[in-house]
Structures are given as C-alpha cells and as structure tokens.
Image: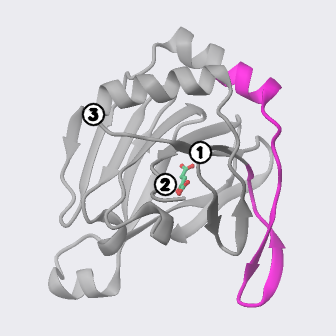
Amino acid sequence: MENIEMPGAHIARDLTFLSEAEADSLFSTLIDHVEWEQRDVEVYGRIFPQPRLTAWFGQGNYSYSGLSLKARPMPEPIEALRQQVEARTGGVFNSVLLNRYVAGKNHGIGFHADNEPELGRDPVIAMVTLGEGRGLHFKPKAHHQRIMPELEPNTQIETPHGSLLLMAGALQRNWTHGLPKKVGRKDRITLTFRKIIGD
Ligand SMILES: O=C(O)CCC(=O)C(=O)O
C-alpha cells in the first residue's frame, strides 16, 4: 500500500489491488447478480431518491441518513473479496456497502463523514473501485481548516478500476468526502468494507 499524505488522517492506496481481468470479471458479476436498489433518504425534512444505487451485506444492522439496513450474508464473490481486502490491509471487516453510479445518469454522493455510532471511533474503511475511475474529493472540516489554514480546501484522490483505498485514522473526524454528481460514461461500483461494532 502507498501512503497518501493527508494531515489528520491515515490514507493508503493500492492502485493494482486487482488485476485487470479480476476487476473486469467482478464488475460484470456484480452488475448482473446484485439486487441494486435506489433508496429514498430524508435531507432536512424532505424525501429524495439517492443519486446512486446501493446494496448492503454483512453481519450487523446499519443506519445512516434515516435508512435502516438489515444484516444479510455476503454472496460468495464479495466474501472472497472481503478476505483479500483483510489480507492486504490487516483490517477486519464484517460488512460492506456497495454504491453504483450508473452510466448516463447524474449520479454521485454528497460530502459526508462516515461517522455513524455503529462504526465506533476512527473507523477503518477499505474501498474497492470497479468500472469508471473518478476522483474522490476530500474537504477539511471547519475546525481542522482553522487549525491548519494551509490545507487545500478540496483535495482529490484518484480511484481507478481495480484499486483499493484505505481510509483510517482520524479522517472521519477531520475531513468530509464526496463524489460530485456527474453523468458517467461507464458504470462505477465501489465496495466500501466496514466493521460494525456491537449488535
Ligand atoms: O463511491 C465512492 O467513490 C465514494 C463512496 C463513499 O463515499 C461512501 O460509501 O461513504
């Protein structure tokens, strides 16, 4: 894993985590076999469809943005990937949130921190990208920017097909991240492995 300099966070990346052939094959399997859903979320009292599709697998229940996701076992190819991710990162992951940004749709994810109580303090999240590579954007939270005024207000980290990005340390306390909405040319799938505590 290559460390990426990010003050007040720990970020590392492996650009060639999966071979081209492995990444292509997993991409098609997930497109064809996962039950993708477009869920509604409540933002400031109004209901919106999320601008992406999602799926959730894992041992624990998970809640975010007013959604409650029930535990479901990981299908075999995702379980195999989970083990590969654990071996590469030394982390422990029992759940995964899949995001799919569909080609031709204005899909993305707003700036947020993955700081739900189920993830504990300073969660370790490992994200595998398949399909369209996009820059994941990071913005320092106001308190962090105040302490370190020299920080870039918006940093991008490229996440190409087959790459693995590890997000850890105090990242979720000091930074937000998001994927600005864009009409993609190809589908993009990200598998974000997490560890749900308790339950
Ligand atoms: O899909 C991406 O590139 C970002 C995903 C993300 O931010 C998340 O699942 O928290």
Q: Which residue is mark 2?
A: 196
**Structural crowding at the residue carrying mark 3, measured as other residues with C-alpha within 10 Å and reported as few (<14), some (14–19) or many (≥20):** few
Instruction: Specify the farthest residue to the front.
Output: 199
- The Cα–Cα distance between marks 2 and 3, rounded to whole angstroms, is 16 Å
Please provide percent x and percent y for residue 126: 41, 42
Which residue is rendered at x = 22% and y = 88% of the image? 146
Pointers 3 and 1 in contact (C-beta within 8 Å): no
Depth check: give the residue in front, 90 or 100: 90
- Check residue 152 in the rendering and tell me which mark sits there, or answer none: none
Which residue is rendered at x = 55% and y = 19% of the image? 23
Please provide percent x and percent y for residue 36: 81, 42
Amino acid type at mark 1: Gln
Please provide percent x and percent y for residue 175: 35, 70
- Mark 3 or 1: the one toward you: 1
Q: Secondary structure at mark 1?
A: loop
Sequence-first tag of 3 and 1: 1
Pointers 1 and 2 in contact (C-beta within 8 Å): yes
Q: Which residue is mark 3?
A: 90
The vertical placement of 145 against 199, above or below, is below
Sequence-first tag of 1 and 2: 1
Depth check: give the residue in front, 23 or 182: 23
- Relative horizontal placement of residue 22, taking residue 7 as reference (left or right): right
